[in-house]
Amino acid sequence: MKMGRGRTSRIRRRKLFRSSVSRGVNESYKPEFIELKKWLKDRKFEDTNLIPACFPGTGRGLMSKTSLQEGQVIISLPESCLLTTDTVIRSYLGAYIAKWRPPPSPLLALCTFLVSEKHAGDQSVWKPYLEILPKAYTCPVCLEPEVVKLFPQPLRAKAEEQRARVREFFSSSRGFFSSLQPLFSEAVGSIFSYRALLWAWCTVNTRAVYVKHRQRRDFSAEPDTCALAPYLDLLNHSPRVQVEAAFNEETRCYEIRTASSCRKHEEVFICYGPHDNQRLLLEYGFVSIHNPHACVYVSEDILVKYLPSTDKQMNKKISILKDHDFIENLTFGWDGPSWRLLTALKLLCLEAEEFTCWKKVLLGEIISDTNEKTSLDIAQKICHYFIEETNAVLQKVSHMKDEEVASINQLTLVETLWTEELKILQASALILNSLQTPFR
């Protein structure tokens, strides 16, 4: 049978290909989701728009049962389904939290409740929700040290800060955990281990939604704004969608309203915010392919790498950039070097006789053709340096994947980050080449 060659056949094939790529495999029949749906129904929630499914590329998520229209509420989760500090205070932990001084943080209360309920197993009221939570996470704090060493330098520094922060969180919480011993027949040290607390911390950090609560005397002064939202937190992130998400005080539900339409049987996304890939990996443990907000950061040492060491005004120029907040968040993006990066380079490339014009540079004025050309040349050199570095790291990761089979998933995550950054740098190199054309 010959394949159709007409316009109708082409449209049909395109639709078939599109649906095969975007459609997920229904998972609502799985026991854990059947139990979760029963549990949610008992708490006055029954969804008619979405079903759990597994999608190529994003994994587990939520699929539309019907076509969703712009402005439609896609999910409305009753307050009774949310896990908040109110939930913790009303539980068996409430009396212990009230007695502890200094008062524990809202984050510690949520993490303690999660660890305790997970330990309770079948006895936990929250078991249907706990069963569908990830067993492990891919935030940098969970990755092997040799994998974190492969990160771009700015992300590596933040990852190390994150690890130190979680370690301190665990260390400073051990006294509070000890006070809970009367609740358990086992030693609390074995229940509230670092590994258990790390899992709970990642659960809150990656899955909580924003719901502001009134300040309680029982908690420290840290903002109490986190709520875990069963079922709703299955929604995956896409940087290309817009949604309105907030707790509705009138309906007492956490609601998500879409700003775009969605076809039947497609994955429904929300947006965690306009985050670049390094921020997404740090906070949520994943990288977004073709992320329009993705960028490559230029640190201070790389910024001056190709500038003449004989420039007697260099220290003064760096000081000016720092004083005017032009030394950080300098980036290459899909549309080339950022305005901030080019502005910083223009100031650094000022000749001695042009130095008095530095204020005009920060305001975006053109000083001279020579200054424009020199700054673009330096930007091109920095871009090529990053391309070489990125290719070298990707080659190293490829070798490690062959040798470190146990860490292959973690290495693939790092590989994806660097691959996306390479694409950005290659796009920036082409743009810089076109910008330099008038000066040739």
Image (cartoon, rainbow, N blue to C red):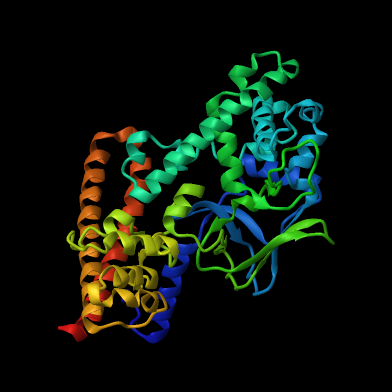
Residue, x 78% and y 56% (percent of image)? Answer: 253
Residue, x 30% and y 59% (percent of image)? Answer: 315
- 224 left or right of 347 in image: right
- 84 left or right of 430 in image: right
In the image shown, does 240 or 153 lie closer to the viewer?
153
In the image shown, does 25 or 84 lie closer to the viewer?
84
Tell how many labels.
0
In the image shown, does 260 or 287 lie closer to the viewer?
287
- 273 left or right of 384 in image: right
* Image location (x, y in percent) of residue 250: 85, 62
* Image location (x, y in percent) of residue 179: 72, 19
Is residue 223 depicted above or below 376 in this figure? above
* Residue 299 in view, yes or no: yes
Q: Where does the C terminus fall, quadrant-wise?
A: bottom left
- 311 left or right of 103 in image: left
Quarter residue 144 falls in? top left
* Image location (x, y in percent) of residue 331: 36, 64
Q: Where does the N terminus fall, quadrant-wise?
A: bottom left
View extreme (right): residue: 250
